[in-house]
Image (cartoon, rainbow, N blue to C red):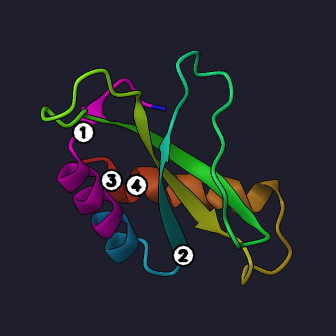
Amino acid sequence: MNHEVKSKEEVKNYFDKLCNTLNEYKFNYYEIDTNDNLKDIKYSSNIELEKIIRLISIKPDKRFKNQNLKLGVITLDLRNIPNISNETYSKFFKDLKEKFKNS
């Protein structure tokens, strides 16, 4: 998780850019609410095989006071990637760094 806070629109723009830039991969996006102590952070998905690659703090909506932290969760969908291994993740993160280094 980066030490940044983005608006919902900024998170959506980031996710869209990620999908368009690394279009050989399939990504999923979820928004989750946290509890007060941040110990039980869970998200639910119908996908059997995915890996969280990024958590983004979402700026609270100014209309509501005392909101819990919301997180944007970006996952890498691994269902269609054959022979998943540590090299798979290494290649993915290398591609990610290379294509986003000037962003």
> Do the CB atoms of the residues marked 1 and 4 lie less than 8 Å apart?
no
For marks 2 and 3, give the CA distance: 15 Å
Circle 2 — which element? Answer: loop
In the rendered image, residue 47, in percent from the top left (x then y), is placed at 71, 73
Q: Earlier in the sequence, mark 1 or mark 2?
A: 1
Say which of 18 and 57 sits in front. Answer: 57
Which residue is the site of mark 3?
A: 100
Q: Is residue 42 left or right of residue 49?
A: left
Q: Is residue 59 left or right of residue 42?
A: left
Q: Quadrant of residue 58?
A: top left
Amino acid type for the residue under numbered disc 1: Lys
For marks 1 and 2, give the CA distance: 23 Å
Would you place residue 82 above or below residue 93 in this image? below
Which residue is the site of mark 4?
A: 98
Magenta stretch contains residue 27: no
Q: Which residues are magenta?
A: 2-16
Q: Earlier in the sequence, mark 3 or mark 1?
A: 1
Amino acid type for the residue under numbered disc 2: Tyr
Say which of 99 and 62 sits in front. Answer: 62
Which residue is the site of mark 1?
A: 6
Which residue is the site of mark 2?
A: 25
* Number of other residues with Cα within 10 Å of mark 3, as a class: few under 14, some 14 to 19, many 20 or more: few
* Number of other residues with Cα within 10 Å of mark 4, as a class: few under 14, some 14 to 19, many 20 or more: few
Amino acid type for the residue under numbered disc 4: Glu
Circle 3 — which element? Answer: helix
Q: Earlier in the sequence, mark 2 or mark 4?
A: 2
Would you place residue 86 above or below residue 29 in this image? above
